[in-house]
Image: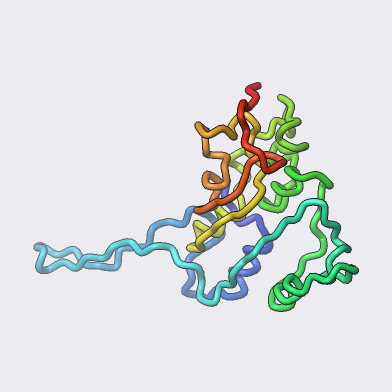
């Protein structure tokens, strides 16, 4: 299935708070809840029961995912670096810290690897979107087989949002006419306030392959 919970961060968060009564969260989208009403011979003998919206498990944590360009792992004080980052320190002390993430050293590939939990070449982003080429692993067209962390969370009852630089939409799909299925709002984020591309500039005439 294209949307298996392949992201260890999300899966571990769910499993740590799940109970025996919880629905199966290893595949998304989750099915509608079972009908628990009654169908009698007449309306008076029947009882309605609407399918209920999916809810996150009780006690599910809030998840804040931050990616900062040109910031090394050893820079912030959160991971022992020389730069004081008290706000990040407080967030980390109340959550989980992962220290085995593989960075690709450039923007788009690192971001898509972080958002999907997959190797960036599996997501067709071997380089930044503006330098894409028409070859497997490098054409920058985010495949639907690579679910984002936002899709996993949204389909498990979370509200999702993204802010700031995106830089993971094919360069020729960043104009105001779309298509929008590879914009953040087409990949699981319900809200997005930010900009496309590598810099905070509007795309006037996107290139078409």
Percent position of residue 34, x then y: 35, 63
Residue drawn at (68%, 34%) of the image: 140
User: Total marks drawn?
Assistant: 0
Position of residue 34 in the picture relative to residue 2 (left or right)? left
Residue drawn at (57%, 42%) of the image: 183
From this view, report whether residue 7 is shown above or below residue 184.
below
Position of residue 125 in the picture relative to residue 103 (left or right)? left
Percent position of residue 199, x then y: 71, 41
From this view, report whether residue 16 is shown above or below residue 142.
below
Of the pair 169 and 156, the residue shown nearer to us = 169
Residue drawn at (55%, 51%) of the image: 192
From this view, report whether residue 162 is shown above or below residue 44.
above
Q: Quadrant of residue 162?
A: bottom right
Residue extending farthest right? 82
From this view, report whether residue 191 is shown above or below residue 138.
below
* The C terminus sits in image quarter: top right
Of the pair 193 and 21, the residue shown nearer to us = 193
Percent position of residue 91, x then y: 70, 73
Position of residue 143 in the picture relative to residue 76 (left or right)? left
Residue drawn at (61%, 29%) of the image: 204
Percent position of residue 17, x then y: 58, 75
């Amino acid at each position: 299935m294209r949307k298996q919970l392949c992201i260890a961060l999300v899966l571990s968060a769910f499993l740590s708070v799940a109970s025996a009564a919880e629905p199966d969260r290893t595949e998304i989208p989750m099915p509608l809840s079972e009908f628990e009403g009654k169908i009698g011979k007449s309306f008076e003998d029947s009882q309605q029961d609407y399918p209920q919206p999916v809810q996150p498990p009780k006690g599910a944590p809030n998840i804040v995912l931050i990616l900062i360009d040109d910031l090394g792992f050893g820079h912030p004080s959160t991971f022992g670096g020389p730069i004081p980052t008290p706000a990040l320190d407080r967030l980390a002390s109340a959550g989980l810290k992962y220290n085995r993430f593989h960075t690709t050293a450039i923007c788009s590939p690192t971001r898509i690897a972080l958002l999907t939990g997959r190797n960036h070449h599996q997501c067709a982003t071997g380089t930044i979107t503006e330098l894409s080429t028409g070859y497997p692993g490098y054409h920058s067209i985010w495949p639907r087989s690579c679910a984002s962390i936002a899709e996993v969370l949204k389909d498990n009852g979370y509200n999702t949002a993204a802010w700031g630089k995106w830089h993971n939409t094919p360069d020729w799909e960043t104009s105001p006419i779309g298509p929008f299925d590879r914009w953040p709002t087409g990949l699981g984020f319900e809200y997005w306030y930010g900009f496309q591309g590598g810099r905070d500039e509007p795309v006037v005439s996107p290139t078409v392959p």
